Amino acid sequence: MDSRTLIGALQDVLLKQLAALTEGHETVALLDFPKYTNIGDSLIWLGQLRLLKLLGKKIVYVCSYDDWNEEAMRRQLEPSSAILLQGGGNFGDLWPVHHEFRLEIIRRFPRHRIIQLPQSIYFGELDVLTKSKAVLDSHPDLHLMTRDATSHALAKSHFTCPVLLSPDAAFMIGPVKRRKPVTRLFLLLRTDKERKTDADNLVRVLDDVPVRSGDWLHELSSVKRLSRLYRAAQSLLPSERLRMRAKLWMTFFVGAARLKEGIRLLSQGELGIYDRLHAHILGVLLDLPHVALDNSNGKISSFYSEWTHRYSGSRLISDMAEIPAALDQLSGRMNRKRSLT
């Protein structure tokens, strides 16, 4: 399947699912903006903003986990407002700060519909799962969107709330144009605790292929400038509502800057090898042929098996010895596409 067809199909699923979940809830709070440097989470945020715009929902409150203000949020919410929690891969005990924030919101807002946007779920400790179950099961109107079959099965077996199987919200960004490549192959490999790939072994397998490599956790000077401008504007705006609108726009521009950097990074290679889920997703949006390698908890393979295995421009590889053959296949596809244009 070509990238545009797949992207359109996944967007349709997201639109239908969230339209049903937010019916009768015309205003929403969107929580846990990723102010940290991981580009992938900013892609999710941008996709969520576009999804809500297409559905005609008004965002009345946004925050990160560390600048949430309960009183300010309550002043912006209407009785019918829904609370939406950022999607991603931090549901569970792998990234506990974000999960604790999620549980706190669920505890404190029992009278509002809460929608957990598409997440991958991972629990390494039984006591954290037990605690999470108690909080989730206590909420009368909680809805959980999971983005892979493994997470969906775990949620269905442990939690009483309705659970949906949903694509990642980053697909709402839609197709994007890549830049001119500068090398044959670009490797985007994790450097955090979800890392599984041995970069040195991978380079040996690739032998003499021209390669550039990196991760996408660095901060951007443009984001620093946007943050300074936002802080200055906050002191000048006369009302809380205007300050919140400015904050919402700031999150959009920060997300757009990080998307631009992600495009720059991946576009360096004619082909790619990625072990970050959102590098794989951005590769699909760019229609950039690439090999996907799994991370430490199987997040990429679960997502690939559910949603992106139909895309003809990527291959999921578990054995490094298979990478050269996969790259040859993808290179052949790329050459055939060029011959048709």
Image (spheres, rainbow, N blue to C red):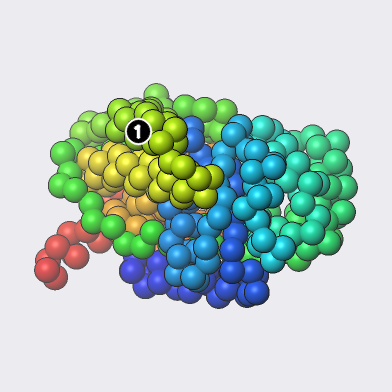
Kindly identify which residue carries mark 1. 229
Residue 30 pos. (x, y %): 57, 52
Q: Which residue is at the front of the view, 68 or 102?
A: 68
Residue 123 pos. (x, y %): 74, 40
Residue 165 placement: quadrant:
bottom right
Q: Is 160 above or below relative to 212?
A: below
Is the N terminus in the top left, top right, bottom left or bottom right quadrant?
bottom left
Q: Which residue is at the front of the view, 244 or 329?
A: 244
In the visual, does 280 lie left or right of 295?
left
Residue 60 pos. (x, y %): 55, 55
- Residue placed at 48% from the left, 35% from the top? 35
Label 1: few (<14), some (14–19) or many (≥20) C-alpha neighbours in 10 Å: few
- Residue placed at 49% from the left, 70% from the top? 56
Q: Which residue is at the front of the view, 26 or 182?
A: 26
Residue 16 pos. (x, y %): 55, 75
The answer to whether residue 223 is visible is no
